[in-house]
Amino acid sequence: MMAVTFQTIAEMFTVNTDRYATKSCYGYKESGIWKELTFAQVRQTVEKMAGGLKWLGIQPGDRVGIVSANSHLWAMADYATMCSRGALTTIYPTLTAKQMKWIVQHSESRFLFCGDKDQADKALSMIDEIKHVEMVIVLDDTQMNHPKMMTLKDLIKLGESYNSSHPRDFEKDIKAISPDDLLTLIYTSGTTGEPKGVMLTHGNLTSNVEGALKILYADKDDVFLSFLPLSHSFERMAGHFLATWVGAKICYAESIDKVGENMTEVHPTLMTAVPRFYEKVYAKVIDNISTSSSIKRNIFWWSIKAGKKAVGLRRDDEKVGTLLNLRLQAAEKLVFSKLKEKVGGRLRFFASGGAPLAKDIAEFFTSAGIIILEGYGLSETSPVISINPYEKNRIGTVGVLLPNVEVKIATDGEILTRGPHVMKGYFKDEAATKEAIDDDGWLHTGDIGNLDSDGYLSITDRKKNILVTSGGKNVAPQPMENVLVTSKWIEQIVVIGDKRKFVSALIVPAFSNLEVWAKEKNLQYRDRTELTRLPEVKELYDRVISESMEGFAQFEKVKKYVILPNEFTIESDELTPSLKVKRNVVEKRYGELIDNLYQESEG
């Protein structure tokens, strides 16, 4: 693939929509049928949307909010905003009206794209209070009875009118955009305090795409399936900008629940996902196999064992012998091919980010020939800092640094990074910017990790998550949570123990599995609260924790735990929109239960 460089994302978009004009750019499902848009059709619509924004009076640097599920319309709203020299403010569609209002207000967005009636209703509830919002554009063309609300069709009509009287404006605007211009404001999900608006420039994103493509190969024949929120920096950079940069086709999943089905329909070659996705797929596979006949179970685990052995040999640059090769051929036919079909049958690799991936899960998929390349980054770093190369994937690490990225490990183990990928700063928050980026340009990531002699980066935990027991022992909860969450009995877990005598945990069971097990045992209970309190359930989880904790030091092991009857959710404010647990919220909410655990042990 020829090395292509672009100064701005807007330039990349216009060059590539010309270069790949007749090729399929986006795929989306409508009324049960997959439809396609060519690069030329996308360009045409974007020009009209950008013209509509110009007609409405957008000025260089103006913020335009978007609150919508992933779709080809989201993608085109992004390009239309940047091509009219605005900056898109991304808002998770799962946020409440109050959270959305805070971001719209803080970002001083003049215009707002809403995906559908639900999002438009949220906007309607605040539109009269926020004077600086001049117009809300509803992408699915739902009519809203308000003078400050219009449909996408209306915007396009205005754009057609504007472009016919200003035929050169679109081209002039693209040329006027510089790499230092603000491309987007991404509000961090904030596991503590109010979210901060990360300012990313065109130069930040072009450098990041360019750096990533020097490690990973992608081209115009690739098909991406996009389901992670585009409001998140990971999907925006990898599943949106990078895909269009190489001329690939992007298909938009109908919803997170339909991803499995959509994979078998569009046969993606590349996908990005977060560990929660792999955990759920893994749990489903293990659950299915555990209810199969003993012959099927034995063949399955015999195949996985052969796959793991081959992965180990290849990692150590050793030869896979004839006998093992024959075993692998049989395993491919009997087991691996069926697993690969479930992810569409053509997948070259998954890219994983957003949170650490459990080593067991990565090894399981890799042994079946489903490659997961784990990477690392933050919204503040555009977002990728490192990624595992396809040929030299080292499980348990987050890969090698992008060639245009610098990293050093501080004396306390914190990862610091510097380079063109580092944000401009936090919007309207100079103090937070100074705290994050030091005078030498190093961004303090807040993550603890190390770089090995081969240049592979490993993450231990978040700096603020490190627990120091009252006995002075440092405990990183992440590795323990990663091991425990691979159990078919555990859905979510939070390890606790800071300034406490020992390590404890809050456990949310995988209720789908637990309820089936309870039924088989003829256990009687009225609701989930009663189920979690049954002595038989306690016995089961004692065993699960004891087996999972075998490889850990005595002071790291979970000594006590509470089984919770409800999942942590975004709605209850216990999860961020990117599905990270808000530890401070969870620990506060269940403070009494946690205190009781420690009091019982003293009593």
Image (cartoon, rainbow, N blue to C red):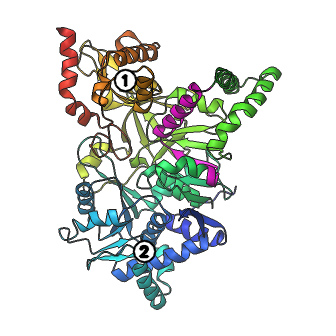
Residue 110: name its quadrant. Answer: bottom left
Mark 2: give few (<14), some (14-19) or many (20+) Cα within 10 Å: many
Q: Is residue 355 left or right of residue 535?
A: right
Residue picked out by circle 2: 84
Q: Residue type at mark 2?
A: Ser
What is the spatial separation of the Cα atoms under label 1 and label 2, in whole angstroms? 46 Å
Residue 385: give x, y in percent of width and height: 48, 43
Picture residue at 24% right of the left edge, 34% below the top: 584
Residue picked out by circle 1: 476
> What element does badge 2 sit on?
loop
Give 141 or 447, whichever is nearer the viewer. Answer: 141
Give 376 or 407, whichever is nearer the viewer. Answer: 376
Magenta span has 266?
yes
Magenta span has 336?
no
Q: Which residues are magenta?
A: 264-292
Residue 577: give x, y in percent of width and height: 35, 47
Asked if one can make out residue 188 in the rendered structure from this viewpoint, the answer is: yes
Give 473 or 46, whichever is nearer the viewer. Answer: 46
Image quarter of the N terminus? bottom right
Position above or below: 422 against 336: below
Picture residue at 22% right of the left edge, 29% below the top: 590
Residue 323: name its quadrant. Answer: top right
Q: Is residue 184 left or right of residue 406?
A: left
Residue 532: give x, y in percent of width and height: 31, 24
